[in-house]
Amino acid sequence: MAIFWTLHLKRDLFQYTHYPVRFNRVTRKVYFFRHNGPGGVVVMPWGSPHAFFHIGRGRQDPNLRDLRCHLLDRHRQVQQTFTVGHFWNHDDDIREQWALICRYMQDGPEHCFDDPLDRVITLSPKGTLRNCWMLVCLMMGTTLFPLRYTLMFPIYGALTLSRWITFKTCRPPVFPPELEAECAFAEDDPHALPEPRFMAEFASDPAIYARALQRHRERMLWR
């Protein structure tokens, strides 16, 4: 039990629900969350030679990639590493994510999207039972999806419950008040995107769903 805790549960339970990274184009800063409390946020200037972004791979599953940032000291030695956003299974997904960040920081939010229907947040960090179920369905893929309520329900249900329990034991990340004020945006900001209450909430719009399907087909052409 001690070995299982050290290798697996210790990294998931009683941690944080997520570790956000903020990009502020007004202050030209990037904020990396580490923990709640004093010194829990690392702040670096955008474009700093001490911040090296790259495509990283997981140790448990090398097929999964994510956008990572190494923070280097003056001797170019890695001091800390942070992941940015969600993981993917193809390098081009990371390049697309990086292109969005660069457009935002360098050209402004009005130049971030190729189509107005792309201006949608799909995932939700809220650890609700509904979100846990939907993410499990997403991660299990389309092949098993028709069996989620029948043959595969015990597996889907167990994975959903374990994810929900993990979220319930974890704390939400809290940025210091001064950083929240520094990164605040106006309520009437025309470029602000509404956060979904649950995953794929806005996919109920036929136009948004059709555009998402088109983008998925375009991604498949990359591979």
Image: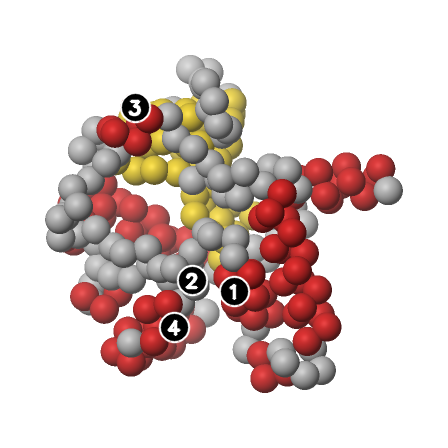
Which mark, by number, is residue 216?
4
N-terminal label among 2 and 3: 3
Mark 1–mark 4 Cα distance, whole angstroms, equals 23 Å
In x, y percent, where is residue 42? 41, 25
- Quadrant location of the N terminus in the rendered image: top right
Mark 3–mark 4 Cα distance, whole angstroms, equals 39 Å
The residue beneath circle 1 is 130
- Residue type at numbered disc 3: Glu
Mark 3–mark 1 Cα distance, whole angstroms, equals 33 Å
- Tell me which residue sits at (43%, 40%) in the image: 20
N-terminal label among 4 and 2: 2
- Residue type at numbered disc 4: His
Closest to the camera, between mark 4 and mark 2, is 2
Image-quadrant location for residue 212: bottom left
Dots 2, 1 in contact, CB < 8 A: yes
The residue beneath circle 3 is 178
Mark 4–mark 2 Cα distance, whole angstroms, equals 20 Å
N-terminal label among 3 and 1: 1
Dots 2, 3 in contact, CB < 8 A: no
N-terminal label among 1 and 4: 1
In x, y percent, where is residue 54? 44, 42
- Residue type at numbered disc 1: Arg
Q: Is residue 57 positioned above or below 3 on the image?
A: below
The residue beneath circle 2 is 198
Q: Secondary structure at mark 2?
A: loop
Mark 2–mark 3 Cα distance, whole angstroms, equals 29 Å
